[in-house]
Image (tube, rainbow, N blue to C red):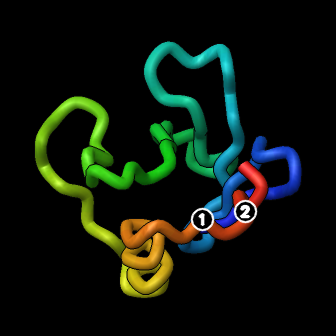
Amino acid sequence: MRFNRSWKTAYWHGKTLRRWPGLFDPNFYDVESREEYWLSGPHRDQADTRYSIIRPKVDDDVREMYEAFLRGAPLPGRERG
């Protein structure tokens, strides 16, 4: 997943997701299908889900970055906070 400079648009698996502050529960929607998503950054304690204790599935293309984050590395694009 990558974000544009303003963090208002995310690109993930061929989808373009836009931030929509007016949504009640989700915070992004797919511009093509209007499907709604909740996007949140990972947590070092691995409590990455919103409403359950089920651990999220980590995509293979970001697994190395996620594991580095768990070891203390900053998230790509967030090196300065």
Q: What label sits on residue 74 in the rendered view?
A: 1
Indicate the position of residue 44 as horizontal and vertical percent values.
36, 54
How far is disc 2 from disc 1 in space, using C-alphas?
5 Å
| Occupied quadrant, residue 15 | bottom right
Q: In this view, does 30 lie above or below 19?
A: below
Secondary-structure class at tag 1: loop
Q: In this view, does 71 lie above or below 3?
A: below
Label 2, on which residue? 79
| Occupied quadrant, residue 28 | top right
Indicate the position of residue 40 as horizontal and vertical percent values.
49, 43
Residue drawn at (18%, 55%) of the image: 55
Q: What label sits on residue 38 in the rendered view?
A: none
Kindly identify the amino acid type of the residue bearing the numbered disc 1: Pro
Q: In this view, does 75 lie above or below 9?
A: below
> Which comes sooner in the sequence, label 2 or label 1?
1
Residue 71 is left or right of residue 47, and the answer is: right
Q: Is residue 26 above or below residue 77?
A: above
Q: Do the residues labelled 2 and 1 touch (CB within 8 Å)?
A: yes
Q: Which of 64 and 16 is in front in this view?
A: 64
Q: Nearer the viewer, residue 35 or 44?
A: 44
Number of marks present in the image shown:
2
Indicate the position of residue 30 as horizontal and vertical percent values.
60, 47
Residue at the limit of the structure toward the right, as seen here: 5
Residue drawn at (87%, 54%) of the image: 5
Indicate the position of residue 43 as horizontal and vertical percent values.
39, 49
Q: Classify the position of the N terminus by image quarter.
A: bottom right
| Occupied quadrant, residue 67 | bottom left
Residue drawn at (15%, 36%) of the image: 52
The local crowd at label 1, few if under 14, some if 14 to 19, many if 20 or more residues have their Cα within 10 Å, is some
